[in-house]
Amino acid sequence: MVNGISAGLGVPAALGIPVTHRGLSKGVTFITGHTALSSPHSAGLNWQALADSGTTLVIYMGLGNLAAIVSALRDAGMSAAMPVAAIQNGTLASQRSVISRLDRVVADVEDAELASPALIVVGKVVEFATAVASERVEPSQKRA
């Protein structure tokens, strides 16, 4: 942990994920997943614009609404193969992460039994994720 650095920057960096990268992500968008209690569509977020933005999405407090967030992004046309990271207790000794894809992340997070607090990173830059400084859970190993 580095004092004064937002979790939205520091947590992905702890896994080797740059939130921007030439040719992969022209920016980063920080959003909250917590306000979408029943559906992300009711949160006032423009999911179509988020899906089309070409930016890395860093979602705070979204684990409890992950299925609805994934559904909204998929409905907006985001690729099922889009890389996603879910990081529990980011930058702490108890940090755990799941690296997945948009179409599998909900099941993978459930299989790994990740819990809040967690940060979700959606974007091609997630492909840079490493297991350094975290317990990286490989959910696909749990399923037959």
Image (cartoon, helix red, strand yellow):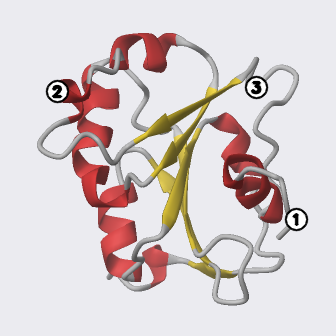
Q: Residues within 10 Å of mark 3 (few under 14, many from 20)?
A: some
Q: Could you tell whether 144 is left or right of 54 in the image?
A: left
Q: Which residue is tagged 3?
A: 24
User: Where 107 sits versus 75, above or below?
Assistant: below
Residue for point 85% across, 63% down: 3
Residue 85: give x, y in percent of width and height: 57, 56
Residue 42, label in figure: 2
Which mark's residue is nearer the viewer, 3 or 2? 2
Q: Which element carries disc 3, helix, strand or loop?
A: loop
Q: Are marks 3 and 2 in contact (CB under 8 Å)?
A: no
* Mark toward the start of the polypeptide (1 vs 3): 1
Residue 2, label in figure: 1
Residue 127: give x, y in percent of width and height: 71, 48
Residue 69: give x, y in percent of width and height: 30, 40
Q: Residues within 10 Å of mark 2 (few under 14, many from 20)?
A: few
Residue 121 vs residue 64, the one in the foreground: 64
Residue 9 vs residue 100, the one in the foreground: 9
Q: CA distance from mark 1 to mark 3?
A: 26 Å
Residue for point 35% across, 14% down: 46
Q: Which element carries disc 1, helix, strand or loop?
A: loop
Q: CA distance from mark 1 to mark 2?
A: 34 Å
Q: Are marks 1 and 3 in contact (CB under 8 Å)?
A: no
Q: CA distance from mark 3 to mark 2?
A: 29 Å
Q: Residues within 10 Å of mark 1 (few under 14, many from 20)?
A: few
What amino acid is at disc 2? Ser
Q: Which element carries disc 2, helix, strand or loop?
A: helix
Q: Could you tell whether 38 is left or right of 141 in the image?
A: left
